[in-house]
Amino acid sequence: GQQLNQSPQSMFIQEGEDVSMNCTSSSIFNTWLWYKQDPGEGPVLLIALYKAGELTSNGRLTAQFGITRKDSFLNISASIPSDVGIYFCAGCNSGGSNYKLTFGKGTLLTVNP
Amino acid sequence: EAGVAQSPRYKIIEKRQSVAFWCNPISGHATLYWYQQILGQGPKLLIQFQNNGVVDDSQLPKDRFSAERLKGVDSTLKIQPAKLEDSAVYLCASSLRGVGGPYNEQFFGPGTRLTVL
């Protein structure tokens, strides 16, 4: 099945630094989502984007839905140790009866205190 | 509110054996999903139920995988017989509804980590 291209694969940063990661797809989606997964847990939704060009914030997190509907990025400002985890982008074409999510391979974030 | 419950959390079996996973979704959630997450990958949808009916099972290897959601609440996913490449985390998720409208948040359980030797 299709997977999204997510980059970078991993990042190692110092506490307090800003982080940026992005996701691209060969096909369009009408919804973009960003999840965080901690070890031994399921993914947790961070931000959902529903409109091309939309810029949405959730605390220190900001995400944008690309104009072409084929990409999205996530920024984390002033990182803290609890930001450690794997971040996944996911695309979805909502509506109808199927909310099938297509996930990227994830970005592993390590924050050095 | 209780989250999505899954059991067991870990399972180790030998190839060609059978295994079953159980999921209890959030109360009142009509839609239930099973995902397979191989190490280093994002989750991949295996099957989606709307109440007790299958909406999408296009990526379910039906020669060895089966799933059911009797009475539209709990669900079981079975693998018979298991292969080495089935080693993965199996995630269950549920959402309030799955039909129409904007995206409906999927809440994930902690997953079952399966190791096939």
Image (cartoon, coloured by chain):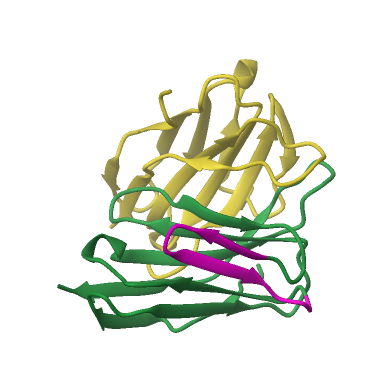
Q: Quadrant of residue B19?
A: top left
The residue lying toward the viewer, choosing from B20 and A80, is A80
Left or right? Give the position of A68 relative to A107: right
Q: Which residues are magenta?
A: A55-68
Verify whether residue A64 appears in magenta. Answer: yes
The picture's colour for chain B is yellow
Question: Where residue A15 sits in the image (x, y, percent)?
Answer: 22, 75
Of the 4 image quadrants, the one containing the N terminus of chain A is bottom right
**From what the image shows, is residue B2 above or below residue A88?**
above
Question: Where residue B106 sits in the image (x, y, percent)?
Answer: 57, 42
Question: Where residue A43 sits in the image (x, y, percent)?
Answer: 44, 52
Residue farthest along the top direction in this orientation: B71
The residue lying toward the viewer, choosing from A45 and B90, is A45
Which residue sits at x=76%, y=45%?
Answer: B102
Which residue sits at x=82%, y=39%?
Answer: B100
Residue farthest along the left direction in this orientation: A113
Q: How many marks?
A: 0
**From what the image shows, is residue A62 above or below residue B61?**
below
Which residue sits at x=63%, y=44%?
Answer: B47
Q: Quadrant of residue B40?
A: bottom left
Whether residue B3 appears in this view of the structure is yes
Verify whether residue B19 appears in magenta. Answer: no
Q: Quadrant of residue A112?
A: bottom left
Left or right? Give the position of B111 relative to B26: left
Q: Main secondary structure of the magenta part?
A: strand
Whether residue B81 appears in this view of the structure is no
Question: Where residue B48 sits in the image (x, y, percent)?
Answer: 66, 41
The residue lying toward the viewer, choosing from A71 and B92, is A71
The picture's colour for chain A is green
The residue lying toward the viewer, choosing from A25 and B56, is A25
Of the 4 image quadrants, the one containing the C terminus of chain A is bottom left
